Image (cartoon, coloured by chain):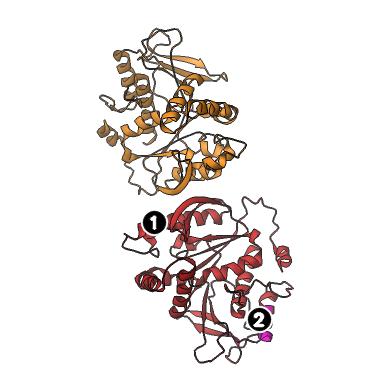
Chain colours: A red, B orange
Amino acid sequence: MPDKLVRMRRVDGSPSSTRRPVMVAVAGDSAAGKTTLTRGLAQSLGPERVTVIGADDYHRYDREERKSLPFTALHPDCNHIEIMEQHLQLLAMGQPILKPVYDHGTGLLTRPRLVEPREFVIVEGLLPLHTKLSRACFDITVYLDPPEPIRKQWKIARDTTKRGYSVEQVVAELERREPESERFIRPQRRFADIIVRFAPVPERHDPPETPLSAELVLRPTIRHPDLSRILADSEQHAIHLRLSRDEDGRPVDALHIHGYAPPEESHVVRKAIWSDLGVDAGDPPETLGALGEGGHSEPLAITQLLLLYHLVAASR
Amino acid sequence: MPDKLVRMRRVDGSPSSTRRPVMVAVAGDSAAGKTTLTRGLAQSLGPERVTVIGADDYHRYDREERKSLPFTALHPDCNHIEIMEQHLQLLAMGQPILKPVYDHGTGLLTRPRLVEPREFVIVEGLLPLHTKLSRACFDITVYLDPPEPIRKQWKIARDTTKRGYSVEQVVAELERREPESERFIRPQRRFADIIVRFAPVPERHDPPETPLSAELVLRPTIRHPDLSRILADSEQHAIHLRLSRDEDGRPVDALHIHGYAPPEESHVVRKAIWSDLGVDAGDPPETLGALGEGGHSEPLAITQLLLLYHLVAASR
């Protein structure tokens, strides 16, 4: 697979310093699954072609300083938003930046790091779609929108194992952050080309190891692969596409990929996504669909494949 | 005096975010007197109107890392030159930067700091005039060019008292740095609008408390105040202006201010500098001419006054 993607690479002969990268935003609340989604994407493109920027690095205050402040790390005033905008503009123009570094382990702001944009720049974080200027820097924008109970589970699991917090601390923090989630994080949903929601299907009783289903809202703000030919406008299949209205009434495509989707249906969707790109793709890379704990999720794999489609299409 | 300068301020009504600051470079080797020159200048303008940037903050490696490198902190490869250029461009356009910070006390690179350009931005350091792109960002460029024996004295005095080195260490370091001083630092002299040299006058035997004399090379690359009317083209006075050729044969004005200059001559020069700006100035601020150790130098005061003239003129 990496071979195939290499063949798709732009060969416009421009010097690397002026080549403009494809810019992708992956926005979402804390523990919404940004890293899991991004990791598989970066691995399938090849790490040497991808720059991943964590927008949390733009925190204005360290953990100790935040304790005495009237807002949480989710608040724009708690972040160097103007500098983030500046750095996104520079990266979009192919320029290097000296990126600040926030250490999630210690909660300290440390020595900055030189970052040169590679072919693809993936910016994942809490607020990459907060301002008009930063939104304008992206070719593709994604918002991760898990149901709150699922996100709470994920946040407890991560913060108690990787960031040294107790369950009670995480729950209290979630509560403290809720007003700012509502005010600053969730409004970014409406600026996304693709909204990704992993959730169980309510009316089904699948075995517990069944992966979560994916519901993708595909806005007509970018050109998605034409799945309507092969996926009937019905709910008879484990994977289906439905013409729909978003929360605000705007027309969208809603792609549902159920966790129990059989391999034959997955195969058809993959083929449709890749054939629309004009590439004779075999199997998708094994890194697609990888979950943090070593598991595999076909809905995640198809979601990542769709993003991969957009990244490669935008790089042409 | 601050009152007078406030009156001279631009009142163009543009919002502060798009107002472009006056950019000044003060380049020179380690311990060439950059901080002493800059401090009096910033104080007389008022600290709230001045942003001082130390270009040493753009060191790419910390002190420990530099130990295993084949070059010293003077080498461009030892500095984020490209990022310095980028930040100078941003500041020149009135934009904020997230400036790296090098701690001279510990030798560590630490948490960066948000810097918003004020009305005047003074960039002092080893390499601000090294590249064409960074030179293009400045309205006024100054190079400090003391004779090497004087600079050696200054460096030993500072580095043994303020940076915890022994005399032997400083002498060895000066020797180690000499090839890079020759190759990268001293060539910046030719890009300066004003070259400042503090030195004793060789043929005189003034008492030891006499301040060093100043020799200023004034290149016709910016419009200097017209001193030729009042300072005869002779060497009969303690302060005199002489039409001269620089090292490379190019025509320059050479302003000599002897350390023993009597107050009446100083007064005439001050008046000439200020009247050319069209301001009825009284006494210059007391901060002009202040030496680190509490002393006063009239040659330094007149040098700073000339720079002040250019800063205010450029801000109009």
Q: Position of residue A47 (x, y in %)?
A: 64, 61
Circle 1 packing at 10 Å, graded few (<14), some (14-19), many (20+), is some
Is residue A39 located in the magenta-colored stretch of the structure?
A: no
First in sequence: mark 2 vs mark 1: 1
Looking at the image, residue B288 lies above or below residue B60: above
Q: Which kind of residue does numbered mark 2 sit on?
A: Val
Q: Position of residue A286 (x, y in %)?
A: 68, 73
Instruction: Determine whether the residue tagged by mark 1 lies in a helix, strand or loop.
Output: loop
Q: Which kind of residue does numbered mark 1 sit on?
A: Tyr
Looking at the image, residue B196 lies above or below residue A37: above
For residue A296, what is the image quadrant?
A: bottom right
- Chain where mark 2 sits: A
Q: Which region of the structure is painted magenta?
A: A257-270
Q: Nearer the viewer, mark 2 or mark 1?
A: 1
- Chain where mark 1 sits: A
Q: How many marks?
A: 2
Q: Position of residue B255 (x, y in %)?
A: 43, 17
Question: Do we see residue B237 in this rendering?
Answer: yes
Instruction: Determine whether the residue tagged by mark 2 lies in a helix, strand or loop.
Output: helix
Horizontally, is B10 left or right of B124 in the view? Answer: left
Report the Cα–Cα distance between label 2 and label 1: 45 Å
> In the depicted view, which residue is nearer to us: B75 or A291?
A291
Q: Position of residue A180 (x, y in %)?
A: 36, 69
Is residue A262 located in the magenta-colored stretch of the structure?
A: yes
Circle 2 packing at 10 Å, graded few (<14), some (14-19), many (20+), is many
Identify the residue position indicated by label 1 in the image: A61
- Position of the N terminus of chain B, as image quadrant, is top left
Identify the residue position indicated by label 2 in the image: A269
**Residue drawn at (72%, 71%) of the image:** A279
> In the depicted view, which residue is nearer to us: B169 or B20?
B169
Question: Do we see residue B80 in this rendering?
Answer: no
